[in-house]
Image (cartoon, rainbow, N blue to C red):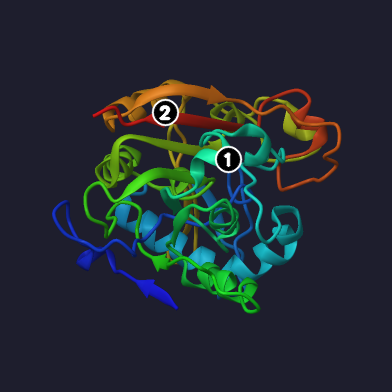
Amino acid sequence: MIQEYEPESAAGPAGGTTTGTTTGSGTAPDAGSGSGSGSGTESDTEPEATRRESGTAESSRANRGWWDRNADEYQTEHGTFLGDDRFVWCPEGLDEVEAELLGPQESLRGLDVLEIGAGAAQCSRWLAAQGARPVALDLSHRQLQHALRIAQDRPTGFPLVQADAGQLPFLDGSFDLACSAYGAIPFVADPVGVFREVRRVLRPGGRWVFSVTHPVRWAFPDEPGPEGLSVASSYFDRTPYVEQDEEGRAVYVEHHRTVGDRVRDVVAGGFRLVDVVEPEWPAWNSQVWGGWSPLRGKLIPGTAIFVCVRED
């Protein structure tokens, strides 16, 4: 069962439930990254890729539709790499078993954990296996249906919630940890607002860890081969990447922030930044994932993971 919350009716700081939420998107290091994702629209006409402003409502609507349309293809293409019950942070293949960015595995038992942008809830399934009590939240209903599909032969053991990351339908202090592997944050126009919501639902001392496309990648074409190794645009251009239909309606939106912007956003959201992890491309990983590839991964970072703590 998927619990659904529309942004207009999502509970505010004093309300909500302890089992539901909406996120900004699924786990998605495959779409956009500043140079084109090839979204599957309902029209036969390919969307136009451009750089223009896109606010909170338009970004949320566009990305919800994109993920509902493309969830099947995404899970078919990347499901094997992600696994059914692994916690993979990024296309580089960094696994939480090795990274322990949420803390030692044994410390997760009994903790309430919110996964934002859960996709098919692979990470939440791993967390549940460690004895944690996860809630998997995603903006896309179709992505969460894949979570139900994977769990057909076994109970999910945790709630699946469709909601928006900017309006989390949870009580204050509901969770010990929050995490997001390429979910929501790259796709929202107001990351500080999302961070403040995450802080609100975390208990004091709670850890918030999220991975995003490394900001430096926005200066390069989103191509896995040699053509993706030459700077093509300004790293400092924060104009969102937008794919739009023939009538100018956004069907996919991704937002760029510099490294400095991300740090300032974390602080403005009420967190202390503990670490920034830039995973190196491992020798065992031969997979090409969109613009992520062994060639580029050996030369420039593809992912940045921010480890944050709510102190009070």
Q: Residue at x 58, y 40 (%)?
A: 105
Circle 2: element type: helix
Is residue 312 visible to the viewer in this orientation of the structure? yes
Depicted 206 relative to depicted 45: above or below: above
User: How far apart in space, not on screen, are marks 1 and 2 (Cα)?
Assistant: 27 Å
Circle 2: residue type: Arg
Residue 98 appears at what percent x and percent y?
68, 35
Q: Nearer the viewer, residue 107 or 27?
A: 107
Instruction: Name the mark on residue 262.
Output: 2
Q: Is residue 73 left or right of residue 140?
A: right
Which quadrant of the structure image shows residue 53?
Answer: top left
Which sits earlier in the primary sequence, circle 1 or circle 2?
1
Q: Is residue 169 left or right of residue 98?
A: left
Q: Residue at x 73, y 40 (%)?
A: 223
Residue 256 appears at what percent x and percent y?
47, 36
Q: Is residue 256 left or right of residue 91?
A: left
Instruction: Name the mark on residue 121.
Output: none
Q: Nearer the viewer, residue 205 or 52?
A: 205
Q: How many marks?
A: 2
Residue 303 appears at what percent x and percent y?
61, 33
Which quadrant of the structure image shows residue 126?
Answer: bottom right
**Which circle, 1 or 2, is nearer the viewer?**
1
Q: Residue at x 31, y 25 (%)?
A: 267
Q: Residue at x 47, y 30 (%)?
A: 307
Circle 1: residue type: Gln
Mark 2, residues whose alpha carbon is within 10 Å: few (<14), some, or many (≥20)? some
The residue at which mark 1 appears reads as: 105
Residue 289 appears at what percent x and percent y?
73, 47
Point out the image quarter for the N terminus: bottom left
Circle 1: element type: helix
Is residue 250 visible to the viewer in this orientation of the structure? no
